[in-house]
């Protein structure tokens, strides 16, 4: 498995460990989550619609010593989050439809980010909120103001340029 091969290389130049963060949008998620736990992943997030039993999938991930997260597609409602928020360490809001590069940010994702931020804050727990997709210099301030802790900007690999925020 690729993750197992990558794990020994998850270190900074000074030798400090770098977490292996796995995002699954596949079925059967339970079997694959177990495999990534065994491969040494530190955090495993998955899409609620990929699991027949979200609570069980979270238990599989956490019982292996990993942090767990939920990833929400643009049209996936957040309601499930209210029932399992005590079992997660990360909420990832997808602001584009997964699997297609070069998409524009879907503005309705801002409402979802704001709602997720309120749910997270109400718990008093340290749950990361991330936004992934369509983030550019033109919209980053508006997105950041909605409440995420981490933004995952798409940087075209063909240019070799790094975007600094």
Image (spheres, grey):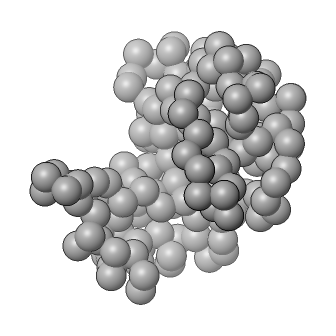
What residue appears at the point 82 percent right and 62 percent down from the top-left corner?
Answer: 100
Q: Quadrant of the N terminus?
A: bottom left
What residue appears at the point 36 percent right and 60 percent down from the top-left corner?
Answer: 20
Give the answer, above or below, for where 126 lies relative to 58.
above
Front residue (pair 84, 127): 127
Q: Left or right: where does residue 43 sit relative to residue 24?
A: left
Q: Quadrant of residue 147?
A: top right
Q: Left or right: where does residue 38 sit relative to residue 108?
A: left
Front residue (pair 23, 13): 13
Picture coordinates of residue 69 (x, y %)? Answer: 50, 47
Q: Left or right: where does residue 2 sit relative to residue 14?
A: right
Picture coordinates of residue 80 (x, y %)? Answer: 67, 39
Front residue (pair 108, 160): 160
What residue appears at the point 77 percent right and 64 percent down from the top-left corner?
Answer: 99
Give the answer, above or below, for where 52 lies relative to 94.
below
Q: Quadrant of residue 125?
A: top left
What residue appears at the point 82 percent right and 54 percent down from the top-left corner?
Answer: 102
Give the answer, above or below, for where 108 lies relative to 3.
above
**Count the marks: how many?**
0
Picture coordinates of residue 40 (x, y %)? Answer: 29, 69
Is residue 85 visible from the viewing direction of this image?
no
| Name of the residue lying farthest toward the left | 15
Q: Quadrant of the C terminus?
A: top right
| Name of the residue lying farthest toward the bottom | 1
Q: Quadrant of residue 37?
A: bottom left
Is residue 19 visible from the viewing direction of this image?
yes
Give the answer, above or below, for where 132 lies relative to 146.
below
């Amino acid at each position: 498995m690729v993750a197992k091969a990558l794990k020994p290389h998850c270190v900074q130049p000074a030798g400090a460990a770098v977490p292996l963060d796995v995002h699954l949008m596949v079925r059967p998620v339970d079997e694959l989550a177990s495999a990534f736990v065994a491969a040494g992943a530190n955090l495993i997030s998955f899409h609620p619609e990929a699991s027949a039993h979200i609570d069980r999938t979270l238990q599989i991930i956490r019982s292996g010593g990993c942090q767990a997260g939920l990833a929400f597609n643009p049209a996936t409602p957040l309601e499930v989050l209210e029932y399992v928020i005590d079992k997660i360490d990360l909420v990832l809001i997808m602001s584009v439809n997964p699997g297609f590069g070069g998409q524009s940010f879907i503005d309705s994702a801002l409402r979802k980010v704001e709602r997720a931020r309120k749910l997270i804050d109400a718990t008093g727990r340290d749950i990361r909120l991330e936004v992934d997709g369509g983030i550019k210099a033109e919209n980053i301030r508006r997105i950041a103001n909605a409440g995420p802790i981490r933004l995952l900007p798409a940087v075209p690999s063909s240019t070799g340029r790094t975007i600094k925020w």
